[in-house]
Amino acid sequence: MTALVFLATLLVLIAIGLPIAFALMFAGVALMLLTDQFDAQIVVQNAIAGADNFVLMAVPFFILAGEFMNAGGLSKRIVEMAGAFVGHLRGGLGYVAIFAGILLASLSGSAVADTAALAAILVPMMRQAGYEPTRACGLMAAGGIIAPVIPPSIGFLIFGVVANLSITRLFLAGIVPGIMMGLVLVVSWWFVARRQQVAVSARVPWGRRLRILGRGGWALMLPVIIVGGLRSGIFTPTESAVVAAAYALFVGLVVYRELDAAKIYECLLSTARTTSVVLVLAALAMVAAYMITITDISGQVGTWLQSLSQHPLVLMAAMMLVVFFAGMVLDFIPIVLIFTPVFMPIVKAADIDPVYFGVVFIMNCSIGMITPPVGVVLNVIGSIGKISMAEATRGILPFLGALMALLVLLILFPALVTVPAQWWR
């Protein structure tokens, strides 16, 4: 009964247009009223506890690092490097988008920021070269959602906080699956590009390639610093966010000299706006998470899934199916905040590796960002590429299918995640 009340309240409030953060809080309040446990103090205390978490300090710094990278020229040089090495292939600009997406993912952690950076640079170039705009935009959106899977990942940060898991382990476990996402996009783009009549760029001489690589080497050093620092224990995930922001500021200001006072102010302002949305969500979702625990909703859901508990593979598939459909109507962070406290007790009871679950769960949430009708990344690419949501949806279909096939593969063969994760320990 409590699970139905929570779900019904949440869906009704979202349907009437209430912001998701407040819908989550009021869904928690509805459970308090149902169980005769309403206390305004509990609401306030849990909201404060939700935001008062040291690990969440990493969120604004990773967002700030992404802003500095886009404004300071790091993103532009990443695209330039990818173009120098694969731009001469048939459909070369598509491969540039994919490889630049992988590299940007290892710098930022935000799908929206990466998609916007890629699209602003590459969509006009692909239009001019004769690529079909809908397919070009679809590929850009699919490449952008690699960001929450490859570290540093804001999704893993929030999931780790809610699930009480090691964020460093989640970061390192996401490296290989994130690269796999890029590889399946390469394969799917190869099939798509064969049917596109486009001009092929001239091969860049090795001398110029090395010069471009030298100019972009500062950008390439950032993921090395972050992963190396995490792996060796030099700094924590929160400290790595500060290092990333400071490094991006230094490179943009001193090395590339594309940052000035006005741009730094805009970066700080944009970071503050984005961070406020994320932290308000995290704070008010804690009210719902508290009541989910008190009313044992996860236990009720576990009872419904009891028949599947002896079959971890089927259970995993069922949970991922729920997340996939939720991704059609909810944004990334709300899905993480709503489903993590519900699913984690079930995952542990079924003896599923929590880190493996976290990687597949976050990948599924990322895919939700390119599924209509909500699809926030689809909206971003539609706005930048000047195409409608219907056109963006048509353009994303082959790449969405490839990513879904990879998700199914990871569910069927958990070792694809768990075995590579051992390499980083």
Image (cartoon, rainbow, N blue to C red):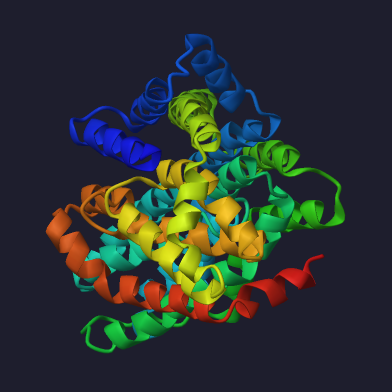
> Residue 286: image x %, image y %?
52, 30
The residue at 53%/43% (across/down) is: 66
> Residue 34: image x %, image y %?
37, 25
Q: Is residue 146 found left or right of 239 in the rendered image?
A: left
Asked if one can make out residue 108 in the rendered structure from this viewpoint, the answer is no
**Quadrant in which residue 364 is drawn:** bottom left
In this rendering, the answer to whether 329 lies above or below 224 is: above
The residue at 82%/65% (across/down) is: 425
Q: Is residue 87 found left or right of 247 in the rendered image?
A: left
> Residue 22: image x %, image y %?
36, 25
In this rendering, the answer to whether 299 lies above or below 26 is: below
Q: Is residue 33 found left or right of 160 in the rendered image?
A: left
Q: Point out the image quarter for the N terminus.
A: top left
Query: In front here: 28 or 411?
Result: 28
**Quadrant in which residue 170 is drawn:** bottom right
Query: In front here: 377 or 291?
Result: 291
The residue at 48%/12% (across/down) is: 39
In this rendering, the answer to whether 236 lies above or below 39 is: below
Q: Is residue 361 found left or right of 417 in the rendered image?
A: left
> Residue 288: image x %, image y %?
46, 31
The residue at 36%/36% (across/down) is: 6
Query: In front here: 217 or 49?
Result: 49
Exactly how many numbered labels are in the figure? 0
Asked if one can make out residue 285 in the rendered structure from this viewpoint, the answer is yes
Query: In front here: 149 or 78?
Result: 149
In this rendering, the answer to whether 179 lies above or below 214 is: below
